[in-house]
């Protein structure tokens, strides 16, 4: 129709699936630290402001994982730019701009640091003042696990698999209560998905997900269609280190330059209190280590948005083709830019809030190995073979559902559960669902 639509997503990997997609934070200049009165950093009479005045539709994917204050910040900003301030007309939300929000409340909800269950639920978009103006539609067909064969015949196994996934996401699958617990959260995983216990758990999941790895360790198609998911970075690092040792290439070590952001502390003797050797020893979530070990042929994941227009977003997977002194040359494995060559430079990364009384700046390549990744990082990805490594049970809403639903066929799901010493509930794991999140999600009458 010749009109402009903007496509955004809450995560970088999901934005790559949208034509011309960008992350919502990048497109709308949404602040990283969100408060109730936050607004987007868009000034009047700028190019972005003029663009928003011409836009006729905004599509926002993975909306449930974003805090409600992000949507409210965009609402206040659009009212201002489009000439509909809040006091003028309370019904003209987003300044009268149609906004299509997509997503699944069964998946991981907004991450609230040190937040309790009620804090996470209250941070969701359906707890915002905007929600009463939303018209709900429900999608019923799984586009990841196709229930029909190429001949158009219904595959009962896939249909039952999709039904099981939805029951896990809704928290209605039969569950048990462990001794000393009040709420039944432990569910049984069908034996067909459990990897038989033989040897070390890490070795078992690697052999199940990456068979014939020695012969196919530099095969792009083989690597991009499979990954191991786990809960914590420390577990993903253990698997990545195990597989890194099996990659028959020379290792190159890149060391970072670390310093304290002077604006984040009043201490004048920073260098004496926090010497470089101490800063080098620190690790932060979403930040590469001081000594980054890399090899040619190693699959890596970006940890920051480097160039979204070229498909280089936080979460993009690549394979290293050349290791230079100042730049990494890699080939993109996923998304619409698959097969393109990318040059990744060192950048300065800042730590987020932590237990330390300062913000640290680390200049390093924003990458990490990604044979394995955390469940939260996998959201938005589709994989032919998914290995789920559970040395400990999930701890938040939607984590198990997200992990299990990344796979495109039931045959591709492999699970290793590390049980307790007495072997009780060996094939059981925890499924946490905040059912109060679904309270006001009844669709409109005309939904199809």
Image (cartoon, rainbow, N blue to C red):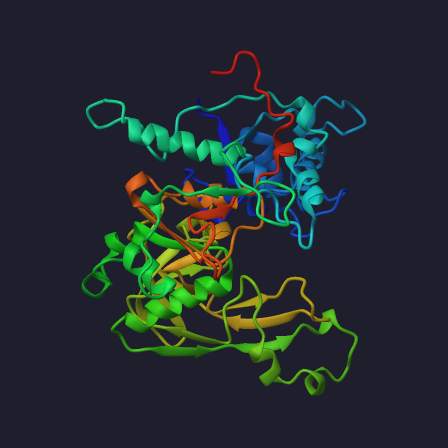
Residue located 56% across and 71% down the image? 283
Say if 5 sits above or below 427 in the image.
above
Give the number of callouts. Answer: 0
- The quarter holding residue 319 reads bottom left
In the foreground, 71 or 154 = 154
Q: Is residue 361 visible?
A: yes
Observer-nearest residue: 285 or 22? 285
Classify residue 40 as left or right of residue 228: right
**In the figure, 404 relative to 105: above or below?**
below
Quadrant of the image containing the N terminus = top left
Tell whether 137 sits left or right of 68.
left
Q: Position of residue 23 (x, y in %)?
A: 52, 45
Residue sitting at 67 percent across and 47 percent down? 41
- Residue at point 64%, 50% (across, down): 180
Check the image and name the residue furthest to the top: 446
Q: Quadrant of residue 18?
A: top left
Q: Position of residue 182 (x, y in %)?
A: 65, 43
Q: Where residue 86 sits: x, y (%)?
A: 77, 29
């Amino acid at each position: 129709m010749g009109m402009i639509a903007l496509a955004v997503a809450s995560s970088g990997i999901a934005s790559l699936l949208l034509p011309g997609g960008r992350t919502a934070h990048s497109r709308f200049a949404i602040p990283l630290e969100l408060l109730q009165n936050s607004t987007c950093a868009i000034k009047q009479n700028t190019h972005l402001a003029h663009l928003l005045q011409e836009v006729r539709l905004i599509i926002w994917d993975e909306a449930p994982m974003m805090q409600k204050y992000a949507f409210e910040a965009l609402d206040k900003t659009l009212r201002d730019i489009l000439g509909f301030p809040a006091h003028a007309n309370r019904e003209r939300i987003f300044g009268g701009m149609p906004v299509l929000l997509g997503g699944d409340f069964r998946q991981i909800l907004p991450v609230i640091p040190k937040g309790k269950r009620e804090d996470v639920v209250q941070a969701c978009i359906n707890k915002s003042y905007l929600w009463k103006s939303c018209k709900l539609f429900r999608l019923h067909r799984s586009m990841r696990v196709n229930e029909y064969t190429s001949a158009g015949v219904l595959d009962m196994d896939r249909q039952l698999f999709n039904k099981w996934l939805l029951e896990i996401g809704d928290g209605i699958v039969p569950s048990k209560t462990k001794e000393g617990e009040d709420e039944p959260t432990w569910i049984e995983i069908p034996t067909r998905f459990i990897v038989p216990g033989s040897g070390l758990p890490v070795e078992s999941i690697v052999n199940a997900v990456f068979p014939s790895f020695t012969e196919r360790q530099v095969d792009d198609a083989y690597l991009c269609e499979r990954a191991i998911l786990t809960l914590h970075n420390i577990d993903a690092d253990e698997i990545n280190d195990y597989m890194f040792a099996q990659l028959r290439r020379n290792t190159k070590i890149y060391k970072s330059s670390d310093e304290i952001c002077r604006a984040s502390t009043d201490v004048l003797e920073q260098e004496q209190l926090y010497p470089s050797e101490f800063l080098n020893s620190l690790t932060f979530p979403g930040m590469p280590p001081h000594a980054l070990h890399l090899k040619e042929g190693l699959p890596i994941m970006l940890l920051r948005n480097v160039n979204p227009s070229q498909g280089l977003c936080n979460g993009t997977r690549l394979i290293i083709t050349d290791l230079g002194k100042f730049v990494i040359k890699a080939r993109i494995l996923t998304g619409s830019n698959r097969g393109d060559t990318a040059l990744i430079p060192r950048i300065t990364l800042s730590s987020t809030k932590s237990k330390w009384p300062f913000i640290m700046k680390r200049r390093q390549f924003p990458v990490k190995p990604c044979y394995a990744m955390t469940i939260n990082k996998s959201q938005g990805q589709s994989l032919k073979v998914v290995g789920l490594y559970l040395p400990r049970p999930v701890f938040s809403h939607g984590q198990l559902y997200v992990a299990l639903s990344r796979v495109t066929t039931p045959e591709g799901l492999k699970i290793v559960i590390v049980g307790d010493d007495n072997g009780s509930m060996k094939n059981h794991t925890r499924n946490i669902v905040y059912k109060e999140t679904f309270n006001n999600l009844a669709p409109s009458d005309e939904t199809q």
